[in-house]
Amino acid sequence: AKVWVLRKHFDGFPKESDFEMKEETLPEVKDGEVLLEAIFLSLDPYIRAMSQLIMKEGDVLFGGQVAKVLQSKNPAFPVGCYVTAPCGWRTHTVTNGKAKFSQDMAQVLPDWPKEIPLSLAVSALGMPGLTALYGLEEVMQVKPGEIVLVSAAAGAVGTMVGQICKIKGCKVVGSAGSDDKVAYLKELGFDHAFNYKTIPSLDEALKKASPEGYDCYFENVGGPFFTAALNQMRPGGRIAVCGAISLYNATTPQTCPYPHMTIITRCLRIEGFQANQWPDKDEASIRRLVTWMKEGKLKAKEKITEGFEHTPGAFIRMLKGTDLGKAVVKV
Ligand code: NDP
């Protein structure tokens, strides 16, 4: 088996030299265990955000994958079935189905529709899709007719936020870092989208996109964008704090002025959340997402990098926003 380990803790943006590929001898499969073969690795920003907290140098990189069960001494995971599993950057894993770094366990993919690519199980129809759904429904409780803003809108989570908003009858505005991404957002049905890297003023761009302000803000980036968005919120507005990708690679502590009087006078609600907070709803929620996709109401783009050996490069590109589409490695 091959694994990628963290050779050196990241200092700013990860570099290829921070990673090292190693060979690993797999243990025998014991009672209760399975041997998994990775098919797709999911590359997500939380790997960077949490690396300092949960990894030490020499550890195997963590993260989700779609894998096939090659051997099984656990009846919950029959040979030949596909699972999503938090096994990290490994080609093969012997596991009892329990994750090391998260409360999530390996999950068998039930009756996966043949016409839907398996890789979407770690993308639009997996964790990022659930994040979008829960942020909108559980945290912000969006209602038809409301105006929703989402940052990092062309990403795995953001594209789902926008499309689900349209299903729910909301108006949705998105920001992204290239003109191609902005064009894609319009193709997906976003009412307005702008390139946050080329606008002269963020405040003006947010006002222009929705002169009447925003009822909900799905926050993915942090930093000055957060403050600018907060200033455009309507009374009674809700902000779901999902991520802060603009801060993950910062080398100096960032400060962000929170306009407290705006929060108070407009009675805003700001709430952080995690995708794994509603495990009892996951199965039914994934079924809803699959149905919407079959009905043509959801589309998903992926940036699939071929080859396990290219995983670090693909991860760095995802953090920089180089490519359009959810970052996945085909092992
Ligand atoms: P994406 O697929 O959106 O990939 C990351 C994107 O972030 C890049 O494509 C890039 O797009 C954008 N980006 C990078 N640097 C900056 C910056 N400085 N300012 C603004 N945008 C930047 O990732 P995901 O959709 O998977 O994740 C989006 C956010 O959601 C992240 O913050 C992530 O941590 C968070 N998240 C949180 C979860 C939770 O449970 N709370 C679960 C899943 C994700 P661009 O070209 O537009 O700059």
Image (spheres, helix red, strand yellow):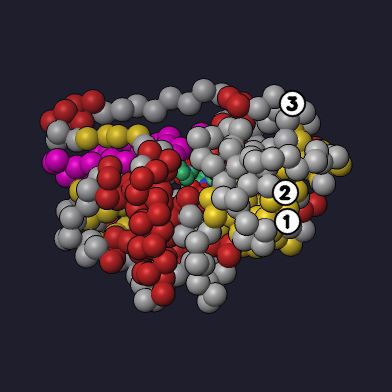
Q: Which residue is mark 2?
A: 35
Query: Which tag, 2 or 3, sits closer to the chain's start?
Result: 2
Q: Amino acid at mark 3?
A: Glu
Indicate if the residue with disc 1 has its beta carbon within 8 Å of ligand 1.
Answer: no
**Which residue does the image show at 47% across and 52% down from the upper left?**
128
Q: Which residue is mark 1?
A: 70
Residue 42, can we see it? Answer: no
Q: Amino acid at mark 1?
A: Leu
Residue 48 lies in magenta, yes or no?
no
Q: Which residue is mark 3?
A: 57
**Which residue does the image show at 54% across and 35% down from the upper left?**
102
Does residue 124 sit above or below 57 in this rendering?
Answer: below
Indicate if the residue with disc 2 has its beta carbon within 8 Å of ligand 1.
Answer: no
Residue 115 x %, y %? 53, 76
- 44 and 67: which is toward the camera: 67
Query: Which tag, 3 or 1, sits closer to the chain's start?
Result: 3
